[in-house]
């Protein structure tokens, strides 16, 4: 899978944003209890998950691999923090935090927290807190093996058609094997300037 291709990365972002949207909407409907945290906004951000991901990728100038690794980090975070599921109130902050951490770990060059805060529509102080809480939520488990990367990288390509045609909130089809499946997929659902964006 050639992540450097514009079309491929465009599909990856569309797939991941659509998948995260389905999870968030499912958790919103079922009213999954949320532990109060820095990731929980008081209101739903007006910017869509797709537009937010496109914005991050455009302005953060991180590597394509960084986006996939950020998705891996979100998957790990949700696995380790079951009281903080993805919802419309948390997904945007989880995204900006995961990409920031991924860029710092993966890329030789990256922007500072103040710039990411501007891209994400939050304050620098909030960005700093998000980064710290996200790292502790991960247990500082940042290494990603090549095989794990390839597993997560394959899902956007393999499931793009199924995702676009799915009619229910249960995403993973019955034929999916959970042996090498990301945690979020196993669950299906879980009970143009940077200054122009705001999550407030």
Image (spheres, rainbow, N blue to C red):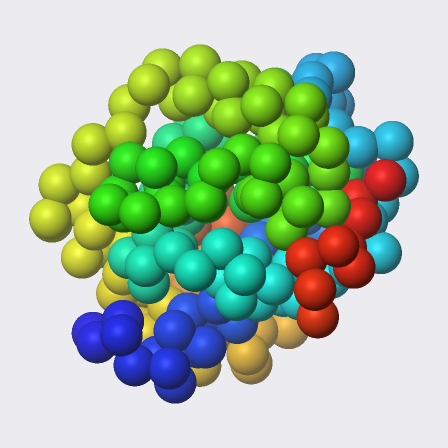
Compared to residue 187, the image places residue 41 above or below, namely above
Frontmost residue, 74 versus 129: 129
Left/right of residue 116 with respect to residue 108 in the rendered view: right
Q: Is residue 82 left or right of residue 52?
A: left
Relative to 22, say whether 87 is above or below: above
Residue at 63 percent across and 51 percent down: it is: 119
User: Quick check: can you spot residue 64?
Assistant: yes
User: Relative to 181, does residue 15 appear above or below in the rendering?
Assistant: below
Q: Residue at x 66, y 30 (%)?
A: 124
- Res 145 quadrant in image: top left
Q: Quadrant of residue 1?
A: bottom left
> Which residue ends up furthest to the bottom in the rendered image?
7
Estimate the x, y position of residue 116 in percent, counting from the top left.
57, 43
Q: Quadrant of the C terminus?
A: top right
Instruction: Please provide percent x and percent y for residue 75.
Output: 42, 39
Q: Position of residue 181 (x, y in %)?
A: 29, 49
Residue in the picture at 33% in, 63% down: 64
Visible residue check, residue 169 = no
Q: How many marks?
A: 0
The image quadrant of residue 135 is top left
Percent position of residue 129, x then y: 61, 19
145 or 22, nearer to the observer: 145
69 or 198: nearer the viewer: 198
Residue at position x 33%, y 18% in the image: 140
């Amino acid at each position: 899978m050639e992540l450097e291709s514009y079309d491929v990365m465009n599909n990856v972002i569309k797939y991941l944003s659509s998948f995260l949207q389905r999870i968030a909407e499912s958790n919103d409907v079922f009213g999954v209890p949320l532990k109060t945290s820095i990731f929980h906004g008081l209101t739903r951000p007006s910017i869509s998950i797709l537009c937010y991901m496109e914005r991050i990728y455009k302005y953060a100038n991180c590597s394509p691999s960084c986006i996939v690794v950020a998705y891996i980090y979100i998957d790990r975070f949700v696995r380790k923090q079951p009281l903080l599921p993805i919802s419309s109130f948390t997904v945007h902050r989880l995204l900006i935090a995961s990409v920031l951490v991924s860029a710092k770990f993966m890329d030789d060059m990256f922007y500072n927290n103040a710039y990411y805060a501007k891209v994400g529509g939050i304050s620098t102080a909030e960005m700093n807190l998000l980064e710290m809480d996200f790292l502790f939520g991960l247990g500082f488990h940042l290494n990603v093996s090549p095989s794990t990367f390839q597993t997560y990288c394959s899902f956007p390509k393999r499931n793009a058609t199924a995702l676009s045609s799915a009619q229910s909130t249960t995403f993973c089809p019955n034929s999916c094997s959970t042996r090498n499946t990301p945690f979020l997929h196993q669950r299906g659902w879980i009970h143009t300037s940077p200054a122009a964006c705001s999550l407030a």
